[in-house]
Image (cartoon, rainbow, N blue to C red):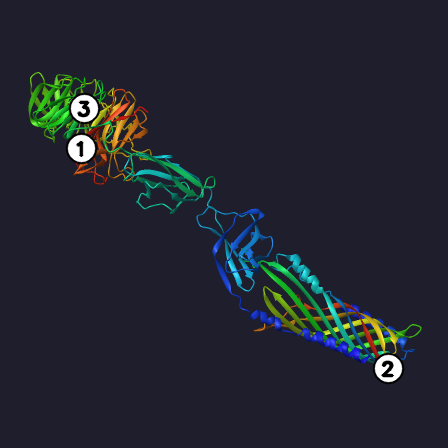
Amino acid sequence: MRPLCSQLLVLLFFAFALSCDDSFLEENNKLIEGFDLEAILYVKPSPEFTEVSITLSELKNKDFKVIQYPKIIHFESLKGHIDESGRMTFRIKVDPFESDVTIEPSYLGDIILDIENFGYLSIGVAHHNFGNPILKLNPQPLDLGVSRTPELFTIQNDGNGYLFITITDVPSWVNITTLNEEPVKNKTYTLHPYSQLELMAVCNRENMAPGVYEGEIVIESNDLSQSRYSLQVQMSVREKGNPDNIIPLQGNVVDCEFNKETNILYIAESNENKIYAFDLATSTIVKEMTLTRNVYALSLSEDNKTLFAGQSAKVSVIDAGSLTELSAIETDFITTDVIDGENGYYYFSKKEGDFSTYFYTYNTTTGEITPSGTYIDQMEGSAILKIKHKPLLLTTRPNSSPNGLTLGDITNGIPTYLKYWHQSFGERLWQYPDGSVIVGKQGIVFKTPSVNTSDPISHIGSLKPKTSSPEDEFGYKYTWLELSGTTKSIWGVYHTIHDEEMPYPRIIEWDINTYQIRRYVDYEDYYTTVNGVTDFYITMPHYLFASTEGNRIVLVKNLLSDDPYHPAIVSTAWHLEIIDVSN
Amino acid sequence: MKQKLPIIAILLAGSLFSLTAQAVLDLPRFRISASGGLGYLFAEGQENIEGVVSREKVDQLSNDLRWATLLNGDIHYLLKEGYGVGVKYIFQNTSGEAPEVVLDPYDGMHYIVADMWEKDYIHFTGFSFGTFSAVGYHQNVYLTSSLSAGYAWLRSEVSVLGQNRLITGSNFAMNADIGADYRFHPQLGIGVNLGAFMGYFDQINITDGISSLEQKLDKDSRYNASSIHLSLGLRYYINR
């Protein structure tokens, strides 16, 4: 029995000895390295377990266990294995959580894994709530036509979210840039809610055969409804030459008049001092005449029967139908405009008229010429408009600010001052076909004034070059305006170097009653030779007339510099362009 | 106070048995006992442990730590009157583990996952006073009781959040038990004991192997190793 007791005592001793082993404390001395995964795990709420995989090519065949995770995440298993390819997978579900729409990711915490024989690996967890961006393209499709000028188009974000867009593909014949001319391809842009990115498309037609080219601009985005958009784009390469609707003109055009009854365009040019009669119906010059002095202006009487050619010290009265001189009136000044008062008197605008004399009244019976001016009869301005069907003149000063507006009575031939308004409407005035409304060259519309009209004159409308243009008390810069009663349109040539969005001249049609923009009409470049180089050149419309039927407009154009900010005419290459606007 | 009542009852019962045996028995001179069995720690645990998310795992760990394995041995010199004095040694071991316990570090963002385990060892050595009385026709069954007072040593190995800690402490402790021996050989017997061990540790030393910290625990957080235990073992008698 003694051995048994001894064994029991030994057993007790072992029990005591085993309970005194401190080696487990040595584990505290183990240094476990920590690593941060450079990638971020982006999550969103999911009620079901979803597999997440991360490839860690340097870690293969290792067990791992999760030792920390964000509260909103639930792991199906907190242990796992990295397979032979380094692919680590785990399944998680994510509780619903509130998040604001922000461009920055919301940090949700870190997952820390204890990887066998490696250390701790920290994986950042974040959530992106970019909201619900909606991509819209304007215009769609994009027709670049034959234009060499940059065409603008916008990528809009019409949703309450952040839109990320990348233009991944464009046809080889078009360059897409920002307004600062930075290439955009394969760059990612961020559009804040309800904002837009304005881009320019410029065609490169070098060495391309004539024809129509179509392609698509591919835009990748985070629009939830459609991540890939295609903007159809089209352009044309012209035959080398001008189309039939462009008619070259000889000389340097100084003035034009248009007979709306016969669709005859009268053109005065100063190189050979000729007047051409161009028939819009046949697109041909049907008559021409040569003047004996330097021509400065051309005017058409209200009944369209008589032409007046203002020249150096002479005004020719010409039969508009036959283009023959009926009479010649000798003057001692240069006449820049002639108004037939329909009362036996003509009114001659003086070039560079001033306070002393702005214009003259010519008595067709006696041949007497009487000056008008500030110090003579208070009539101010050498730009004269006779109000239709009334013995009233409106004059304005072309070269001073404000232009001012003077109303004069011509019942007795010699103008009688009635009223003056110290306002600016532009250096030239147009009137509605019935004479009820006046439109100034700055696009300001007002009722035809009478002696009872208030001072200042109230505006009844304004012609804006863009729907987004703000109201401007002083209006906008129009080169020419034209009123068409048939289509109830106001046509205009808009050009200013100060409009970066619209640096090149644009043809605009407004509604004559609402002054809302109906459309923009494109026109052609001009194929000609400048300084020995034959090519297409950008043009500048100086005059615009609408046909009687309203289905065509005719532009009288010259060249414009390629640089819209330096729009000096580089050459004399006047021509006509007839555009069908019936659609 | 609650723990003291069972001990007094055990002592009274043991005294009664010894008085009965005093008149008729010729007890052996020495009684050596070695037993093993199970114990149950009846101390109340902490209801809510701050920061624990997966409470069920920690509860399971707490429950596992209540069940102890027990070894004890004693030797008594017996007087003819049925009393004996001697020494007693008790080894009590509890252990448990809770894998993947989820904890809240209160950073407002994360949960932490940790494997927890705990191994507690109690060594008790004390002087013992016992009573022995023979009963039965052959006088080969002894009713026994003993009351021991001495010193207990705590050794607790704990691992939480990957950090291992050794907690040690010592304090006075007591043990009381009653039992019965069946003497199937003049020198051998088997016996069964039902006992209660009382031991608290409120002065502890915590070490991680590098640094140590002495800590005084308050009444609510002191380590209570008190248990009731049932053991079965061999008895060796050295006769007069």
Badge 3 marks a residue whose secondary structure is strand
Please state which amino acid type lies under the numbered disc 1: Ala
Task: Kindly identify which residue carries mark 3.
Answer: A257
Across and down, in percent, residue A246 comes to 23, 28
Please state the chain letter of the residue tagged with numbered disc 3 in the rendered image.
A
Q: Which of the 4 quarters of the picture holds residue B113?
A: bottom right
Q: Nearer the viewer, residue B164 or A411?
A: B164
Q: Position of residue B198 (x, y in %)?
A: 73, 70
- Quadrant that contains the C terminus of chain A: top left
Q: Dot 1 corresponds to which residue?
A: A573
Going by the image, does B166 lie left or right of B107? right
Toward the bottom, the furthest residue is: B240
**Can the viewer see residue B47?**
no
* Quarter of image, res A136: top left
The chain letter under disc 1 is A
Q: Position of residue A26 (x, y in %)?
A: 59, 72
First reached walking from the N terminus: tag 1 or tag 3:
3
Residue position for label 2: B239
Residue at horizontal 62 percent and vertical 73 percent from the top: A23
Check disc 3 and give the amino acid type: Glu
* Residues packed near mark 3 inside 10 Å, few (<14), some (14 to 19) or many (20 plus): many
Q: Quadrant of residue B102 in the image?
A: bottom right
Q: Residues within 10 Å of mark 2 (few under 14, many from 20)?
A: few
